[in-house]
Amino acid sequence: MAELNPQHLLLIDDDQELCELLSDWLQGEGFAVTCAHDGRSGLQMAAAAEADAIILDLMLPDTSGLEVLRELRRLHNTPVLMLSARGEPIDRILGLELGADDYLAKPCDPRELVARLRALLRRSQPVPQGSGQLQCGALRLDSESLLVWRNDELLALTQTEALILAMLMHNSGQLVDRQQLSREVLGKPLGPYDRSLDMHISNLRRKLGQHADGRPLIQSVRGRGYLLRQ
């Protein structure tokens, strides 16, 4: 039986046959799917309707998927999973730097795509530990909206970045294991060459800024994990 209020996905990909196949599969898994076949119409659809997550192809006919991602991040922090037929490490790195939440190489197994999307959507839910707002020094995080402020300045964090920060704030001053952080926030164990968590941490550091003495707010403990320093 279909869900009364299915989660809505926006699929931006110029391969219409692939869009039909993925749409059929995703709808069979209980999602509602809207398709766009170029960057311009994808951005218009993203601005006009509230998608729960966006699947974005890197190669589009009118513009780069990275440029579309840049504009999407200017508009909102909806979870974005990028697809690329090239699968080059530099594409993944650039996508994560611009705010993509996850990345899959084409051709992908639809079952893995569904699993990744469900992990993204779980991560976009309110922070489960406690309620209300978290406060650590100048940082304040709203557990429901996942909005973050530093000294009353609203920060433009993605949902993934906000969830990483929430976990670090819950354990302020304590080391948080890299594998634990990846499993609980990214929904997957870290492989030996997986740099996705490091990229999210790097983006988060840049957006948070530094302490007055130049120390980063998030400290790395090589090979072990990260801790938030007040």
Image (cartoon, rainbow, N blue to C red):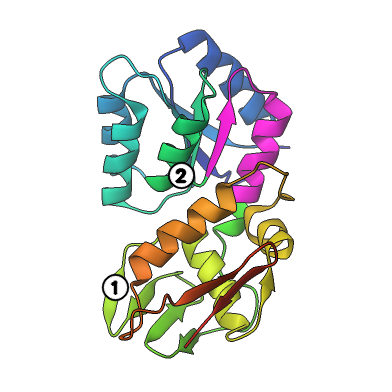
**Three-letter amino acid code of the residue under disc 1:** Leu
Q: Quarter-wise, where is residue 130 in the image?
A: bottom right
Q: Is residue 121 left or right of residue 201?
A: right
Taking 160 as reference, is 135 above or below it?
below
According to the picture, the residue beneath numbered tag 2 turns out to be 96
Taking 154 as reference, is 203 above or below it?
above
- Secondary structure at numbered mark 2: helix
Residue at image position (65%, 22%) is: 108
In this picture, which residue range is highlighted in magenta? 102-120
Taking 1 as reference, is 105 above or below it?
above
Q: Residue 82 at x, y = what percent?
A: 49, 33
**Three-letter amino acid code of the residue under disc 2:** Leu
Residue at image position (52%, 31%) is: 89
Q: Residue 150 at x, y = what percent?
A: 33, 80
Q: Is residue 156 left or right of residue 124?
A: left
Please tell me whether residue 111 belongs to the stretch shown in magenta: yes
According to the picture, the residue beneath numbered tag 1 turns out to be 154
